[in-house]
Amino acid sequence: MLIAMPGMVDQNFAGSVTLLCQHSDAGAIGITINRLSDYTLGEILNQLKIDCDDESIRGRPVLEGGPVAPDRGFVLHSPLPGYESSLEVGEDIMVTTSRDVLAEIAEGKGPEKYVVALGYAGWGGGQLEGEMLANAWLSVAADTSIVFDLPLPSRFDEALGRLGIQVDRLHSEAGHA
């Protein structure tokens, strides 16, 4: 996971925690996991014409996954094979853009844990590496409890805590020895 440093000037990422889903020489893709969108899952299901009568599912929040393609939906979910386009992000997390996961969620089936997000964070080849060298991001191992279980406002501090850092100890200026 990427944790935005206090000096992050891009308001799309200030105070954010982003799960890195794919990284190669061509670039990187991630889903921000601590920003609330203006939508509920029920509104998304309505737009996709997927029926769901369960208000606990319909009322679930949808996240702002990042500034790229904000009209495109992503589902981060606990492992459950058999979906059209789910890809492993790690041992305990998968990501998909496939409608079949949402249809099963609406029926009360599907993955045990999930997060729905609109949009994603994207970096061109070498861009993320440059931002890391410029101290724009800290990195920490992905943690399912942060991704799926913690309330959104706690995710940033908890991700930092996994590194043994308290937010009030971070400074927006960094140097190199």
Image: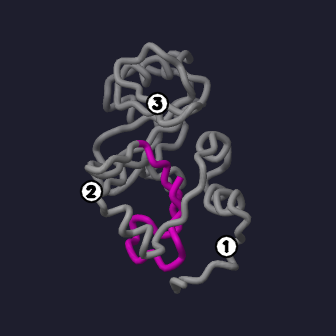
Q: Earlier in the sequence, mark 1 or mark 3?
A: 3
Q: CA distance from mark 2 to mark 3?
A: 21 Å
Report the amino acid beneath label 2. Answer: Gly
Q: Position of residue 49 (x, y in %)?
A: 32, 23
Q: Please state, as top left, top right, bottom left or bottom right, where the C terminus lies in the image.
A: bottom right
Position of 126 with respect to 35 (left or right) is left
The image's mark for residue 63 is none
Dot 3 surroundings within 10 Å: few (below 14), some, or many (20 or more)? some
Q: Earlier in the sequence, mark 2 or mark 3?
A: 3
Report the amino acid beneath label 1. Answer: Val
Q: Which residue is mark 1?
A: 167
Q: CA distance from mark 1 to mark 2?
A: 30 Å
Residue sitting nearer the eye, 14 or 19 = 19
Residue in the image at 51% along x and 62% along y? 16
- The residue at the far front in this view is 177
Q: Which residue is mark 2?
A: 125
Q: Is residue 39 above or below residue 43?
A: below
Highlighted range, magenta: 1-21
Residue in the image at 59% along x and 44% along y? 147
Q: Position of residue 32 (x, y in %)?
A: 46, 52
Q: Which residue is mark 3?
A: 88
Q: What secondary structure is the magenta-colored segment mainly?
A: loop
Judge depth for marks 2 and 3 and give the one in front: 2
Q: Position of residue 95 (x, y in %)?
A: 44, 33
Position of 123 with respect to 117 (left or right) is left
